[in-house]
Image (cartoon, rainbow, N blue to C red):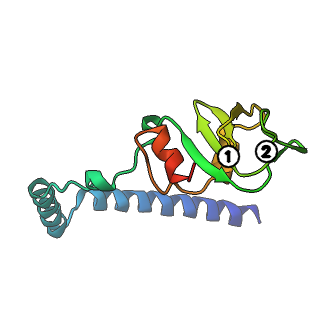
Amino acid sequence: MLHRIRRRATKSSEDQREFLEMSAQLESQVPREVDQVRAELERAESSTTVDDFLPPELRVLSHDQVDGKMMPWKQPLAVGGELVACQQCGAYRDWLVLSTRDQIWLRCRAGHQQQEPRLDTAWFNRNSGPADATYATFEECLRHHGR
């Protein structure tokens, strides 16, 4: 029984050796077509340089080029089981949520702003949709949201 196992083991190692020798021979042989295709690709790459970026009017600013983000929050805002209310006028719904410099600020309809330390940028990113526009000033953004 052990002789059969030894014969199988030596046979498989011989097969592996033959395979490695054949693959080494094949690696050194490259068909002519491969060289022709490589030359054509190099010519095509050198002759055509296309700017694959969007035109400036369609580009979106990156996160480090924007001072902040804003989203409307019409329903009441509950954080940690507590309803958030404006500290000055008592409003508890129809917020503008501002995310700037890793801080979250809430702005009520009356224009009062308060920082909300229990919320973070991750919360803002989970709850906000894609940006529909960018604005040069804070006031322009407020006008866009009807404030």
Name the residue: 69% across, 66% down.
4
Front position in the image: 21 or 9? 21
Residue type at mark 2 is Ala
Please provide percent x and percent y for residue 39: 12, 60
Front position in the image: 7 or 134? 134
Front position in the image: 39 or 141? 141
Residue 109 tag number: 1
Residue at the extreme right of the image, as rendered:
81
Q: Are marks 1 and 2 in contact (CB under 8 Å)?
A: yes
Name the residue: 71% across, 52% down.
94
Dot 2 crowding, Cα within 10 Å, few <14, some 14–19, many 20+? some
Name the residue: 46% across, 45% down.
140
| Label 1 element class | loop
Seen in the image, is 131 located left or right of residue 1? left
* Residue identified by numbered label 2: 91
Please provide percent x and percent y for residue 81: 91, 45
Q: CA distance from mark 1 to mark 2?
A: 8 Å
Residue at the extreme bottom of the image, as rendered:
33
Name the residue: 62% across, 40% down.
98
Dot 1 crowding, Cα within 10 Å, few <14, some 14–19, many 20+? some
| Label 2 element class | loop
